[in-house]
Amino acid sequence: MSSEPERRFRTELLEWGEENRREYSWREPDRTLYEVFVAEFFLTQTPADNVGAVYPRFLELFPTLDEIADANEDELVEVIEPLGFQNMRAQALKRIASTHDHLPTRAESLMELPRVGRYVANATLCFARGDRLPVLDRNVERVYSRVFRDVWTETEADQLAFTEKLVPDEARTYNLTLLDFGALICQTEPLCEQCFANEYCDYFRESSRGT
C-alpha cells in the first residue's frame, strides 16, 4: 500500500506534467512499437536533443526492421554517428534485424536482444502500448532516492518494486512526466524551491536542516 507522500507525489507529478511535459516526435501517441524502440535505444546515454536531430532521418531510411536487415552496416553507422557509440549501435541493430521480423512484445523477451536492458524494454512497451511498467533510469533513480530517501534502497529488486508500486494506470503519462521532472527540476543540482514535493521530500528536509 502506498504511503501518503507517495500518493501525493503521484498526483502532484501528473498535475505538474500538464503544464511542463516536454514534446518530442517519438512521444507522439501513434508511434509504432518499432519507432518507440528506436528512440529509446538511441536515448540511452545520449541527450534527447541529439537524438531529435537524427531520429527523423533514421526512420526515413529505415522505417522497419526489414530495411535495417537489408542495409549495409556502414550505412547505419553513418546515420547514427552524431549520437556516438555508432559502431556498437549499428552492430546491435543489425543483429536484431537479422533475427527478428517483429520486435517482441514482452519485456523479458526484449531484454534478450543485444544492447537492450530493462529500461529500454520497459520504456518501449510503456510508451508504445501503455503497458503498466516501471521506467527506471538514472534520472528517475535520482528523483526517488531524494524524495523518498528514508525508504529507498540500493538493491535493484527493491528499487523496481518501489517504482512499480507508484506507477498508476495512466502509466505512459506518468512515466514520461517523471522523466521530464528529473530533467527539468530534480536535476543533479536540484531546483528545490520550484519543486511541488518539497513539503515531504526527504532530501529537501535534510538539506534545509543543514542550512
Image: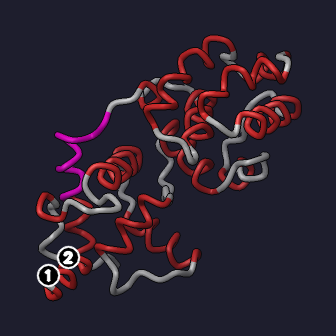
Rendered position, 42 above or below 79: below
At 21% across and 41% down in the image, what residue appears?
20
Left or right of residue 66, residue 12 in this image = left
Rendered position, 136 above or below 66: below
For the residue marked with disc 2, what is the amino acid? Phe
Give the overall secondary structure of the magenta segment. helix
**The quadrant where residue 29 appears:** top left
Left or right of residue 37, residue 48 in this image = left
> Which quarter of the image is occupied by the N terminus?
bottom left
Q: Which residues are magenta?
A: 12-22
Tell me if mark 1 has few (under 14), some (14-19) or many (20+) residues whose alpha carbon lies within 10 angstroms of its own.
few
Tell me if mark 2 has few (under 14), some (14-19) or many (20+) residues whose alpha carbon lies within 10 angstroms of its own.
some
Q: Of 73 and 94, which appears nearest the observer?
A: 73
Name the residue tied to disc 1. 208
Rendered position, 132 above or below 83: below
Q: Is residue 190 magenta?
A: no
Q: Position of residue 141 (x, y in %)?
A: 44, 66
Q: Of 205 and 4, which appears nearest the observer?
A: 205
Asked whether the residues under the numbered discs 2 and 1 touch, taking CB atoms below 8 Å apart as contact, a structural biologist would say yes
Distance from disc 2 to disc 1, alpha carbons, whole Å, reads: 6 Å
For the residue marked with disc 1, what is the amino acid? Ser
Name the residue tied to disc 2. 204
